[in-house]
Image: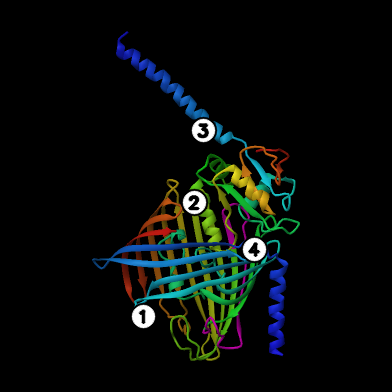
Amino acid sequence: MPRLISISIISFVLVFIGSTGCSYSQITQIRGFADALASLQKDKVSFSLGEQDLFITSELSDRFSFLGESVFRFTNTTPTKFSVSIERIVIKYNIAGNHNILLGKHHTPINYWNDTYHHGRVLFPTIFRPLLFDANIIPLHTTGISVQGQNLGDMKFGYDLMVGNGIGSTDVLDNDKRKSITAAVHLKPVEGLRLGLSWYNDVISKGATTHDGMLLGWTVNQNLFTGSVAYFGNKFEVLAEGTSGTNKTDTTGSQHTLASYIYAGIKIKEKIVPYLRLDNLHFGTGEIFYDKNNTTSIVAGIRYNLNYVTAVKLEYQHQHGEKEGDTNRLTMQVAIGF
Amino acid sequence: MTFQTICILVYRKYLSILLLLFVGLIINAQDAPLTAISNPKGAPATLKMSDLKSIMKGEKQRWSDGTKVSIVLMKTNTSTGEITCQKIYSMSGDKVKRFWLGLSFSGKADAPTFCNSVTELESIVAQTPGAIGIIDKVTTGSGIKIIMVDGKNSF
């Protein structure tokens, strides 16, 4: 029976590839991003390498396309002190119009930042990602299948419905029978404005390892609700996102976490943007899934876009964390695309 | 009248002429008409300007007959490319390139093909079913059709 299913799937794919025309010329593009930083913290200047991101797109046929993203970064635990990670492998099939099926490893379309910037640091409005990323509030990646639609109707409605291996799984095997579900919708009612909502659900098995490396002693039912407002106009830039997370176990009940940030920038010249970002992480008192560390942060910086693939940013960050207290950091970054 | 005064007057006169020519060129560049062309297969014969802008921003993946939309543009450092950036995208050339980098990186759209010359652009459009491009002349080359935008040949 499994063999019959395999043959059917292979036949289905071959029929689709065949129906899209053998004479289609394959167009493959390889692009990349990299960044280098210098920072001043605790009276010490440090130079550091950011990530080197290789990004490949290929139009396989009239309807099939491929997108791959691999990141090379410093990792202290490997013999070479560097590691390679597959951030995205997405095979896309255009069903009809603006509706697509996507299969592979995705950046979970849970919020604007995660679904837009990926690892292209030159595209980031600030040097570092918002705190809710570092605190692992949202699952950054999902390996699975999704249906996506975009720019539908006058309001440019878009949707993503994704089913994937949940938290605790690997990219090749799910650790349990439950699948994670992501449902996201957005509207782009006027030029430059995008309003989005999403819901993420997963039941994370007892014994699974979280993003923080914590071994779970309970089965956790997780629900994440995210709202986002993004406006990137000719003069002003605003990006505000908030995620409300509920982690429920049979023994500890429901614990609520709220993670949010707001970014605002103003173009004083076409290439120069001073900006501010405020972050806030607030965890429930008995939180058992996240590393409870209530944190606030303010970032003030300036971005200079030399050209479309080179950006220089200078920013100051003051952060207050429940565990580490006050920290201050001044960072300069040169981010490029190639 | 001293020689120096004469020199200043001549200088001012020619400077004014040069300035007028320069301003004229800028106005001419901004007013230079553009034409939307397409492969006979795919694109409709007429479009509204708002629809053309939406299509050129990668917001439409397929034409109504199911043909894939392929965008072909002049490079942003050419005069036609520059005018296209202003009239279609309301952005500078650099911003248009950044816009497409971001869009293709997020996997939401395929990047356009950028051409060095109008001849190259016309050739790609003629050879690619579903292709649509913007040029600076009203052309009726083989394998190409003109799309009327808001009822006009050019805009």
What's the residue type where badge 1 is placed?
A: Thr
Of all residues, the one furthest to the left in this rendering is A43
Could you give the CA–CA distance between mark 4 and mark 1, rounded to whole angstroms? Answer: 41 Å
User: Circle 4 is placed at which residue position?
Assistant: A158
Where in the figure is residue B145, as x and y percent of width and height? 71, 44
User: Circle 1 is placed at which residue position?
Assistant: A78
Could you give the CA–CA distance between mark 3 and mark 4, rounded to whole angstroms? Answer: 39 Å
> Is residue A120 in the magenta section?
no
Query: Mark 4 or mark 2, which is nearer to you?
Result: 4
Q: Using the image, name the chain to which the residue with label 3 belongs.
A: B
Magenta-colored span:
A168-195
Callout 1 secondary element: loop
What's the residue type where badge 4 is placed?
A: Gly
User: Circle 3 is placed at which residue position?
Assistant: B26
User: Circle 2 is placed at which residue position?
Assistant: A236
Same subunit, labels 4 and 1: the answer reads yes
Q: Using the image, name the chain to which the residue with label 4 belongs.
A: A
> Is residue A189 in the magenta section?
yes
Residue B49 seen in the current view: yes
What's the residue type where badge 2 is placed?
A: Phe
What's the residue type where badge 3 is placed?
A: Ile
Callout 2 secondary element: strand
Q: Using the image, name the chain to which the residue with label 2 belongs.
A: A
Query: Mark 2 or mark 1, which is nearer to you?
Result: 1
Could you give the CA–CA distance between mark 4 and mark 2, rounded to whole angstroms? Answer: 24 Å
Q: Using the image, name the chain to which the residue with label 1 belongs.
A: A
Same subunit, labels 3 and 1: the answer reads no
Crowding at label 1, few (<14), some or many (≥20) Cα neighbours within 10 Å?
few
Q: Are marks 3 and 4 in contact (CB under 8 Å)?
A: no
Q: Is residue A137 rendered to the left or right of residue A39?
A: right
Quadrant in which the N terminus of chain A is drawn: bottom right
